[in-house]
Amino acid sequence: MRLRLEKRLEPSRAMLVLTPVLSVIAIMLLGIIIFDGLGYDGPQAVWELFFTPVLDVYKWRDVASKAAPLIIIALGLSLGNQAKIWNIGAEGQYILGAIGAAGVAFVTQSMTGFWIIPLMILVGMVLGAIYAAVPAVLRTRYGVSEVLSSLMFVYVSLQLLSYLITGPWKDPDGHNFPQTAQLTDAQLLPHELWDSGIPPGLLVALIGAVIFYIIVSRTVFGFSVRAIGEAPHAARYGGFSSNGIVWATLMISGAMAGLAGVLELMQLTRLNLGYPSGYGFTAIIVSLLGRSHPVGVFIAGIVLAITYVGGQVAQTFVHVPNATAGLFQALLLFAILASDLLVRYRIRISTTSPSTKGAHS
Amino acid sequence: MTMTFIIDALVTVIGITTPILLAASGELVVEKSGVINLGVEGMMLVGTIAGFAVTFETGNPWLGILVATLAGAAAATIFAVLVLSLGANQVATGLALTIFGIGLSSLIGSNYVGIAIDPLESPFPDALANDSFWRVIFGHSPFVYFAILLVLAIGWFINKTRAGLVLRAVGENDLSAHSIGYPVIAIRYAAVAFGGAIAGIAGADFSMVISPLWAEQMTAGRGWIALALVVFAGWRAGRLLAGAYFFGVLMALELYAKASGHAIFPSQFWAAMPYLIAVIVLALISSRDGKDGKAPACLGKPFIPNG
Amino acid sequence: MSVAPRLELIDVSKRFPGVLANDRVSLSVKPGEIHALLGENGAGKSTLVKMIYGIQAPDSGSVLWEGQEVRIPHPRAARRLGIGMVFQHFSLFEAMDVLENIALGLDGAVSRKQLDAEIRLVMEKYGLKLDPRRQISTLSVGERQRIEIVRALLLNPRLLIMDEPTSVLTPQEVDDLFKTLRRLASEGCSILYISHKLHEIVELCERATILRGGKVVATCDPRKETARSMGEMMIGSDLRDPARGQLSVEGPVRLSVRELSLPKPDDFGVALEQISFQVKGGEIFGIAGVAGNGQNELLEALCGEHLADLHTTIEVDGSPVGRSGPSGRRKLGLCSVPEERNGHAAIGAFSLSDNAILTARSRMGFENQGFIHKAGADEFAANVIKTFAVKTLGPDALAGSLSGGNLQKYVMGREIMQSPGVLVVSQPTWGVDAGSAAFIHQALIDLAAQGSAIVVISQDLDELLRLCDRLSVINLGKLSTPRPVGDVSVQELGLLMGGSHATPANSAGGIHAA
């Protein structure tokens, strides 16, 4: 008896939804084995990592505030993913968004006015979009793969951030710490909405998911993005410009990353060296785990946020290292990539007949 | 400028160039087979912790290098299974491998933070290795000599041997190679594992020579430079060697700016420089429309045998 | 019959998901015999020869080589037995030279110098001309095929499999090929010749095995048959010619192309040079030519994927469209169907309804202020499916799940039902079963009868001669002067298709006009 793969005539829609769930479960089981192997209490570590943040009401706010930037960035990335345009430099655009907002904050330190917050958001989004436009120029004008170029700019943005907070924007009252001054009240959104524990970012993420859903499923633009991703030649024949889509998807994802950067800055209230948290990278996992579908992305963002919060819980109670969450996120990504096979193929169990045995030996 | 300064500079450049030269050489073989593994950074990080931990625990640096090699190859094999056997997207999987490498090296390395090991030194006698002039040739770690020999060997292998011809054929036209009867998937597995092994060694160079005090993510994006270098070199071994030392000089400028403290621009500018230059160079190379060497035609595309 | 057959297949079957590609196929090839394997696209010919050459493994049945039962797990084993194969799609490596390509096809390591000498020897013996040092990307299709043949001959094969070798050749090149094959057969090499071109088989082969739907339906001696009788065995019903009404057209000019020149799109493409022609309403204009002479480039230039330098280079009903993209040209009534169905004319991973949105959204009004009117697309797709008898579950079925012929019918229907003033189609019946081909031909004729101007680009001369009012030949990106179909002989067309490179051979009997 042997297992045989058989290509499906049409990708399985059930598997498309089911495989991310299976991946999460598989990773939990794998986690128990890994933790036990490393000498920790496996079941408890996995419990703390995945379930405590869900069951403990006091952790919900943490989960929500981590999920918000992940979802916002991942929504933008999902659009590009569908066009097979890989912006893996979202972390850089996220940082640029925060730098833009911090720049507005730096200039408006002594001012008040309702316009300051919208301006911070606008500048952050524009800066994020411009930063993502650089790989778009490079790809459409010079044929440079956006994968490498967008990533290179992450490292550039890290150095820019480091320069600004150790140099021109350093907080004069900060005891020489490399950080900017605290945002003023006129520069801050409420920490949570209506005292409900919901951070403003989560509401933005929710509205964003609805908007992206409409774009992808109802508009010609959304259609063109999917067409380019599936069959660029056919999309060109259909009258869509692939360069236009490269520009649009990169700049939209850059603007979304920038927006997440601004909102996160308002949560943290200042820029410091700890600001780049890797959300831009984790959002790629969110987007793939959520199958680039706005609803999927929203759920996946919450799952990944749980692993962040759970990682901290597990560190406190089971004493596993802080890096655990990152490792689990990577394993989750491996699992989701591997399980794609089930969407396109079905597994058949066949008994070996003598002739086929001969043919395959 | 004194002679000592020049020799110091050369020694520094050669030293910091070596890991990217190694990683890029390995990736060159991978890409020649038609696969792009963006997980170089992750495989290097797996190599850094494997080399460091084994050397620290056993006191035997050679065992450390061996384990780093195997660990790099093992990490690459995860990528190979996903991409070659399960048909996963190469970009996403390479990225996953990088995230995996960061997570795994940080997890294992959490026990070693702040610990240092003795750096691996020149294999030549002290008289040569520490001579004020001859150290420019003999004063390097074994990684340096290995890297140069490796890139030359790879150049010879790709262009002059039958196995190299087959490797190129698989990267140029996988369907044709398959229909002639070459085992495309097996050849790509071998190439990917080889690339991973060499990336593992490149990582070990970081943790055992360049920065033998354990710190998380010590490769700091050099794996991505190695990827850019392969494009820069037009997929040719000779140009890879030259290009690697060019980037080495750029990276040395950052060290110099930090150390001297009186560079014209802030040190962050010099730190960002290799990445900016890499992007500019990619633009120049790519816009020349393949006149400097072409990417293997099947690079990054999944192999779907038509029957 | 005392000699064991060189190759014998007994009850060989092979199943793929959803199809039984070969159903208990038996076949035997004698030493020195030129044996035809005849069948329509999709009849299972390719699968069968892939099993003989070790690319695929049979699910059941046995393979006998010179009387001995053998297993052929990979092509290497096939070559070791003495089986050579020349593929329909060449397994060549563009970026390498002829020598490297041939070396890759050999199993042992041979020095370049030695190989060079061996190649020259074989070429001299069989009258094949080729420069071993040239890079593949600079070679013509005919030259590329010669590499494959030389590569196979270097191994002194005892069975040579030729998979549709003439689909890319000019009539003169076909003639040369047949000489080489006859010479080989006279030396005792068996040849398994796969084709769906009946007249070639009548001319060349001594025996034919005919496949239909994966089964052997007949074995015959082609020399005692006619093309028509074998065609009936192959297709299983009487051949029907489409009904063409009047042949002289006096309508207004609907498509005008003036001195269209475009550089080659990439290293492997063809530049278009000074192409000019006009097509009137009600007229079907044919463009013949050997594959790879600029047909795809011309189609893309006409449909707007590549823009002309001047707006006035291309005009539709008098309006210049040379600088408009595909959407702008469609709005003015210029629709097109490219050769490649899946991936160019349609998106396999999209539903049929979404594929309607791809090209019909503005003409049929499924687009409003950037939003898509999905119900409209569903309705249109359902209408195309019904009118063109597309076998599918409905508008939600993925285009990739349709058979080649059905997808072609859908794609043709999608464009025709937009009532285009000008329709440009490439290879309208490539790989389509005879019934569907007749249907598509009739649909084109009907569209012309309604006053549309139609351009048909095809490599199938029979098709063009039956369908068109006027014909041109494209060769190396240049278009010959259009001629009325009645005024031009097949031999002339053959010479034009060979361009200046063709030797003016006096036998063009390889082409058979119906």
Image (cartoon, coloured by chain):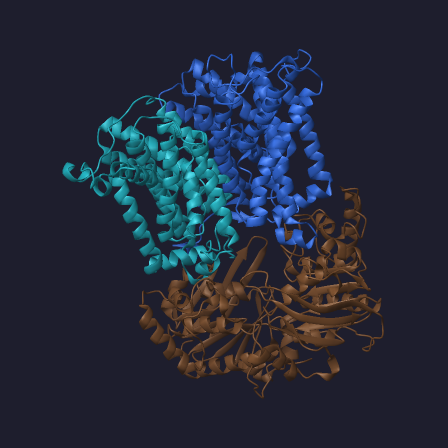
- Decide: is A125 above or below C333: above
Residue A292 showing in the rendered view: no
The chain whose colour is brown is: C
Q: Which residue is the extreme one toward the bottom?
A: C506
The chain whose colour is blue is: A
Left or right placement of residue A267 versus residue B8 in this view: right
Residue at 77% in and 51% down: C382
Q: Looking at the rendering, in which quadrant would you find the C terminus of chain A?
A: bottom left
Residue at 45% in and 48% down: B231
Closest to the observer, C136 or C17: C136
Tally the marks.
0
- Decide: is B60 above or below C216: above
The chain whose colour is cyan is: B
Q: In x, y percent, where is residue C125?
A: 40, 82
- Decide: is B218 above or below A45: below
Q: In x, y percent, where is residue A31?
A: 44, 26
Left or right placement of residue B35 versus residue A256 in this view: left
